[in-house]
Amino acid sequence: MATGVKDGLAHRFSTSRGEPASIHPALLALVGLLLAVVLIPFIYLIIRAFEKPLPEIAQLLLRGKTLEVLGTTTALLAMVVIVNIFLGTLIAAGIHFVRMPRAHLLIVPAVLPLAIPSYVFTYTWLALIPSLSGVFAAAFILILTTLPYMLLAILVSLRRIDSGFIEVARTLGLTRTQIFFRVVLPQIRGSISAGALLSGLYVLSDFGAVSLLNVETLTVSIQNMFKSSYDRGAASVISLLLILASIIFISVDERIKDKKAKENVFKRLSTDDSRIKSASLKTLLISALGIYVTLALFLPIYVLISRFIGNPNPLDISGLASAAISTVTVSALGALIALLFSAPLGFLIATHAGRFSRVSERIILIGHALPGVVIGLALVSLGSKLGPIYQSIFLLAFAYALLFLAKAVASMTFSLQLVPQVLKEVAATLGKSKTKVTTSVVIPIALPSIGLGTLLVFLTAMKELPATLMLRPTGMDTLATQIWSYAAINRFNDAAPYALLLVLIAAIPTFLLSLPWGDWESKADGTKTRVGSLM
């Protein structure tokens, strides 16, 4: 291919590291519109918060109760993130580096707890230990809930580390421990940070677990203000405080990633030569993973089944079916809306490296930090002015899309970046238009990963509680709201069928997400190669 033609195609289909390619006005307008939609909750909160006089805002923020709640939230966040980093790195490194037959199968039970919402975890453990409460109990539950995020993030990174560095370190006489800290850890630090970010944002936004365990975090405080005094101004002020805490947390993650961006260059793929044959490490791995799976999967499932079987009350099959249908329907609609929103945003971020795309990405990520109660608070006010849209399934699905848009955009961006540039260039030389290249080359390659991202949004939406409680249509119950209604008054037997059905439905997308789809990557010539096999 002539150099001039190649450069022209590269300019046409990609963005250089210097000046970004110009953004099509239609794409720019569409992304701007979507960002305006994403910013609706922020704008609402600012307007409502500053309806209060500044002295009153200062008094609210500096009062002892607010500082106590902020301290509790920070302590809970620190405990969960620190433990997740340690356990997640230990278990993920064991699965990747310890030589075991069919080691990739260990990922499935390790990730399946994603199917269980934090409030279901809490409900099952309260059924086992009725006196369970407090910050440490909440940290325990949230660690069980969020550890799979850390495991998935680190495993993806481990599959792509440069095993050549490991081989060189071995020839220099470094021990396994030295190799891990000097060679492996620097290459996966960005993914550890990403896993910590996901875990931390979950902790900041969680309502069900902390509420059931009598721990007042910022999210619980906002919900209590909204319900008891109906003081939306005060609730908005505390919501802005929660957003500020999330922004600080996200900024720390971005600084870590920026610092390590140039170091995390993956030149060679991992091979089985880096696997460790050690009976003691194998025993340690199986023990650690076995304890986690027992606490996070087997015990909750056992409690749900035993409570379901031992329930003396007749099963309300029609109510159960109605709640299940409502859950699946509104979650699927929310995932579809998120998919539609993510297409232009993901395309912009994947193909136009510039200030506008970076700002767009940060706005979406900060939006992901908003808990369901904050989104619900904003959309309740907005929806009440929109007539028939208020208290409709569409408004609830729209809330799901806003809450989990960051997951859809991240998946869309990653999927589009997987498409080999050379395939698009070859298609262009054959006379195909940009539209034809997109439909015949880009979409078929990116579609599987996009589908998995949509599944993740669907899974997360099924478990969402605060936004559902605030925005569901009158008379509509979902599995999440039914579980909450019964668990809040200690009717665990009645909650069991709804919790069990929610876990069973959520287990399907969770199982699909846990499969090692990332083991295969396209080469530039269109063939495929195994990446970091766990076999």
Image: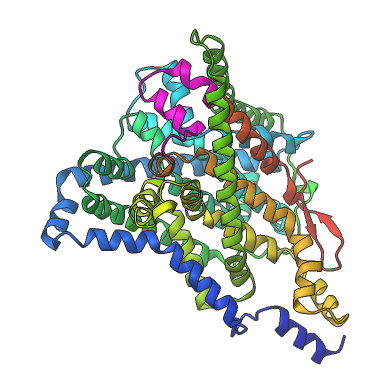
Residue 493 among those drawn in magenta: yes
Q: Is residue 512 visible?
A: yes
Viewer-nearest residue: 6 or 174: 6
The magenta segment: 474-498
Left or right: 221, with 40 as reference point: left
Q: Could you say which quadrant of the image residue 415 lies in?
A: bottom right
Q: Is residue 222 above or below residue 13?
A: above
The quadrant the C terminus occupies is top right
Q: Position of residue 317 (x, y in %)?
A: 57, 20
The part of the image, by quadrant, that contains residue 471 is top left
Residue at horizontal 47%, vertical 18%? 494
In front of the other: 105 or 35: 35
The answer to which quarter of the image holds residue 424 is bottom right
Q: Main secondary structure of the magenta part?
A: helix
Which is nearer the eye, 385 or 487?
Answer: 385
**Residue at (68% x, 37% y) in the render:** 511
Taking the image as shown, residue 445 lies to the left or right of residue 177, namely: right
